[in-house]
Amino acid sequence: MSAPRRPLRRRVLTMLVAAFAATVTALGFATPAFAITHSSATSQLQGAGITWSSSGGCSDRNKPTCTSFDGIRQATITGIITFKRASGCAVNITGGTETGHASGTYSHWNGYKVDTSLSTCIENYIKANYTYVGYVSGWGYQYRAPSGNLYTKEGSHWDVLYYTCGC
């Protein structure tokens, strides 16, 4: 009689673990190594009303004139969606994981960063809600969100570093 219970318990436990993992992923609490595809990212961005553009009109990760999301972290996508919802601003992404950006652990290539177009709405929201860090020579004016994420105005765009999925 106890033999039939083991498979049932195992199935229930497996279902609970799978449900927990799906919930964690859906909420953006993914590990830094959790990278997603361009298609998955664009689907989520489109659903949130976020646009993206490319000077080359393409999404090839290996071309610097493209805007690609291949290999972007789920937390980065969730972070920009959270920012859009919190700010109420229109957001247009102009840079993702494509080659041509600075290297490093917390880089575009590794899925931690996006670039966005400038707008008065975005600038006003950042200045009103985030802590001014200072001018970073060679980069621009930097602000830190309560989440720890960094927003740097680099002249022609905002360079946003998402350590977490919060804005």
Image (cartoon, rainbow, N blue to C red):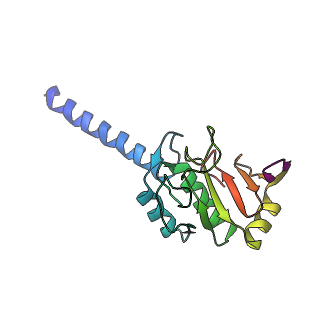
Counting from the top left corner in percent of width and height, residue 108 is at: 59, 49
Q: Is residue 135 magenta?
A: yes
Seen from the viewer's position, the closer of residues 75 and 68 is: 68
Counting from the top left corner in percent of width and height, residue 98 is at: 54, 53
Q: Residue furthest left?
A: 1
The answer to whether 129 appears left or right of 102 in the picture is: right
Q: Measured along the vertical axis of the image, is residue 46 above or below residue 101?
A: below
Q: Residue furthest right?
A: 134
Q: Residue at x 76, y 57 (%)?
A: 154
The answer to whether 61 appears left or right of 116 in the picture is: left
Q: Which residues are magenta?
A: 134-141
Counting from the top left corner in percent of width and height, residue 88 is at: 67, 71
Q: Which quadrant would residue 77 be assigned to in this image? A: bottom right
The answer to whether 14 appears left or right of 71 in the picture is: left
Q: Residue at x 62, y 44 (%)?
A: 107
Seen from the viewer's position, the closer of residues 61 and 29 is: 61
Counting from the top left corner in percent of width and height, residue 117 is at: 67, 67
Q: Residue at x 31, y 36 (%)?
A: 13
Q: Residue at x 50, y 44 (%)?
A: 30
